[in-house]
Amino acid sequence: LCDALRTERIIGVMGAGISNWAGYDTWDAVLGRLAEEVTAVTGNPAIAADIRRLNENKLHQAQKLGDQIGNVAFQEFIRREFALPGKPVHEVIKNLVRLPVSHFLTLNFDGSGELSHDAVGLPYRTLSTADAQAQLAFLADCHVRGARRMIFHLHGLFTDAIANIALH
């Protein structure tokens, strides 16, 4: 691994664990707030409770809860929840982005990777699978030495249309 890192040709991967270190709430907290919105819309707390109880996968829970409030309200919820958290980025994630990798792939649709790079002053470009041109740009440039680091959101980005965010 150390030898590979010296080449700076490794692509790092970030997942949900990084988000909390960047100041975002846990999925349980987010799902709790989404369940409250479902209850407010439906007037029936059992609907949200059943969805949470019957769906072990948190992304499935999010999608099914989102279905209950409709696409427009769910889109607004996602944008609100995954906007900048306003909390400091933990040193752990700062150290992660300081690793000599060429790019980062992320399964997160929040801005935790971007916040982390900003916190340590590293330049980057943000790409999302919601943009076909961005996908081509990543594939064309990911192997170029010295290219600006790209943070490529494989599940989409919170600012993308809800249909372009992969929850399951």
Image (cartoon, rainbow, N blue to C red):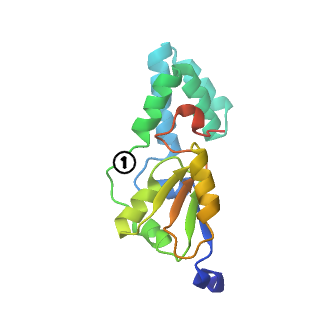
Q: Position of residue 150 (x, y in %)?
A: 52, 62
Residue at (42, 69) in percent of width and height:
94
Up the image or down, 120 lies above or below 154; here it is: below
Residue 121 or residue 63, whichever sits in front: 121
Residue at (44, 18) in percent of width and height:
40
Residue at (63, 70) in percent of width and height:
143
Specify whether residue 143 is in view. Answer: yes
- In this view, the residue farthest toward the top is 43
Quadrant of res 130: top right
Residue 145 or residue 65, whichever sits in front: 145
Instruction: Say few, some or many: other residues with alpha carbon within 10 Å of mark 1 (under 14 / 14 to 19 / 20 or more).
Output: some
Residue 166 or residue 85, whichever sits in front: 166
**In which quadrant of the rendered image does the N terminus lie?**
bottom right
Up the image or down, 98 lies above or below 59; here it is: below
In the image: residue 162, left or right of residue 121: right
Up the image or down, 156 lies above or below 46; here it is: below
Q: Position of residue 82 (x, y in %)?
A: 44, 43
Specify whether residue 20 is in view. Answer: no
Residue at (51, 21) in percent of width and height:
69
In the image: residue 48, left or right of residue 41: right
**In which quadrant of the rendered image does the C terminus lie?**
top right
Quadrant of res 137: bottom right
Q: Please, what secondary structure does the residue beneath circle 1 have?
A: loop
Q: Position of residue 50 (x, y in %)?
A: 62, 24
In the image: residue 77, left or right of residue 154: left
Residue that numbered label 1 is attached to: 84
The amino acid marked with disc number 1 is Leu
Up the image or down, 46 lies above or below 62; here it is: above
